[in-house]
Image (cartoon, rainbow, N blue to C red):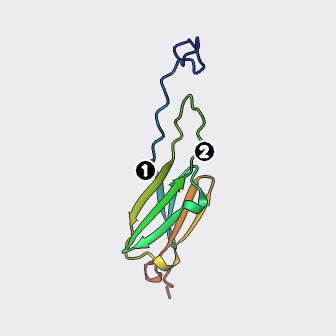
């Protein structure tokens, strides 16, 4: 690393530009959605989200997911470079008429939120006996 890119002081002066003030960002998390026999599964990538900050709400057939990432450091360390900013994940999904909104469940593990949306009974596939 040459002296122009060095994060350490050179001759008593900082070699890098000052670190900008932290910004709060709203991020749309990536999602995978698939259909199972008895419902739909939505998996959202929300790395570093604090579990207690995650909210899944349903209103007027719209599901909203919101999760926050807390600052990594308390206090105000003197950063040489800062790329991990506080952020909030937000994503909304329109739900079809076949979703049983009373029985939605969610789990969070390893930075992935999995929301299970069960189908109403009349929308579930069923086998018909042949006589």
Which of the pair 39/22 is nearer the observer? 22
Q: Answer yes or no: do the residues labelled 1 and 2 have beta carbons within 8 Å?
A: no
Q: Pointer 2: residues within 10 angstroms few (<14), some, or many (20+)?
A: few
The quadrant in which the N terminus is found is top right
Q: Give whichever of discs 1 and 2 has the lower sequence position.
A: 1
Q: Residue at x 57, y 55 (%)?
A: 112
| Residue 126 image point, x, y percent | 49, 79
Which of the pair 105/40 is nearer the observer? 105
The residues bearing labels 1 and 2 have C-alpha atoms spaced at a distance of: 17 Å
Q: Taking 14 as reference, is 70 above or below it?
A: below
Left or right: residue 24 versus residue 48 is left
Task: Kindly indicate the quadrant of the structure image that contains residue 92.
Answer: bottom left
Q: In the image, which is nearer the foreground, mark 1 or mark 2?
A: 2
Residue at mark 1: 26
Q: Pointer 1: residues within 10 angstroms few (<14), some, or many (20+)?
A: some
| Residue 125 visible | no
Q: Residue at x 54, y 61 (%)?
A: 54
Task: Kindly indicate the quadrant of the structure image that contains residue 106.
Answer: bottom right
Q: Taking 45 as reference, is 128 above or below it?
A: below
| Residue 99 image point, x, y percent | 44, 75
Query: Label 1's element?
Result: strand
Q: Taking 108 as reference, is 84 above or below it?
A: above
| Residue 5 image point, x, y percent | 53, 17
| Residue 12 visible | yes
| Residue 24 image point, x, y percent | 45, 47
Residue at mark 2: 72
Task: Kindly indicate the quadrant of the structure image that contains residue 52.
Answer: bottom right
Q: Residue at x 55, y 59 (%)?
A: 113
Query: Label 2's element?
Result: loop
């Amino acid at each position: 690393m040459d002296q122009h890119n060095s994060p350490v002081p050179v001759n008593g002066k900082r070699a890098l530009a000052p670190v900008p003030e932290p910004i709060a960002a709203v991020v749309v998390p990536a999602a995978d959605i698939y259909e199972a026999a008895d419902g739909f599964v939505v998996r959202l990538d929300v790395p570093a989200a604090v579990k207690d900050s995650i909210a899944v709400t349903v209103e007027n057939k719209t599901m909203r997911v919101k999760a926050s990432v807390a600052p990594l450091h308390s206090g105000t360390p003197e950063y040489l470079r800062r790329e991990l900013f506080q952020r909030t994940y937000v994503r909304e999904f329109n739900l079809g008429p076949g979703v049983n909104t009373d029985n939605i469940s969610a789990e969070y593990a390893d930075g992935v939120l999995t929301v299970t949306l069960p189908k109403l009974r009349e929308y579930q596939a069923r086998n018909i006996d042949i006589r």
